[in-house]
Amino acid sequence: MESGIKTGFGKGSGIAARAGGIVNELGRTLSAMNAEDLGKLAGRLLEAEQIFVAGAGRSGLMMRAFAMRLMHLGMRAYVVGETVTPGIGSGDLLIVASGSGETRTVVAMAEKAKKLGAAVALLTVTPDSTLGRLADIVATIPASAKEQTGEGAVGVQPMGSLFEQTLLIACDAIVLEAMDALNTDASIMFGRHANLE
């Protein structure tokens, strides 16, 4: 084990306090979000013929979870890069997540989607970014991008953790809004859950 580990590490009491701090940060961040932006994203989602989601790293994992819930809602939702993902086109929606708004692979996806006539929605820390300028809908998450450290960071968590956690909750809130609009419930959604597990 690496030397320099503090005495008393792992006793548990500090972990509970840290978890409480994370929950408080999430609450403050979600409260500071513009609900109208999320509403626009939810509305566009319901209009789309097909929905594609993308993001890199942990942001990508949150978007994969979002795609799964959209599938449970009965939508044609796909994760960019999967072998079963079809082509995108006019009438479709690409939803991307990038804290910095500058993730090269995601920028390239958004540029191609726009050229093919699809709409692009962005969840980001940085609306004034390359992706922010490309997107038709931008929902800003007032957290830190993973590149921000020291005085530029927001909150106690490292790197992009606050952004990624808020991203997951914001997407789940969009799902709840869509459930109301589609007049569906969890039991109907569960009927679409994978059953080869």
Image (spheres, rainbow, N blue to C red):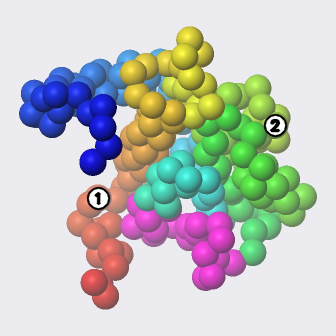
Instruction: Identify the residue at horizontal 43%, vertical 58% (top origin).
Output: 65
Q: Is residue 139 visible?
A: no
Instruction: Identify the residue at horizontal 30%, vertical 32% (top origin).
Output: 4
Q: Nearer the N terminus, badge 2 or badge 1? A: 2
Badge number at residue 130? 2
Circle 1 residues within 10 Å: few <14, some 14–19, many ≥20: few
Q: Quick one: SS at disc 2?
A: helix
Q: Is residue 62 left or right of residue 186?
A: right
| Residue 97 figure quarter | top right
Amino acid type of the residue that numbered disc 2 sits on in the rendered structure: Thr
| Residue 141: x %, y % from top left | 54, 29
Q: Marks 2 and 1: which is nearer the front?
A: 2
Front position in the image: 101 or 19: 19
The residue singled out by tag 1 in the image is 185
Front position in the image: 16 or 140: 16
Instruction: Identify the residue at horizontal 71%, vertical 37% (top origin).
Output: 101
User: Up-down: is 86 above or below 55?
Assistant: below
Q: Is residue 109 visible?
A: yes
Amino acid type of the residue that numbered disc 1 sits on in the rendered structure: Asp
Farthest-out residue, bottom? 196
Farthest-out residue, front? 3
Magenta region, residue range? 67-86
| Residue 129: x %, y % from top left | 77, 31
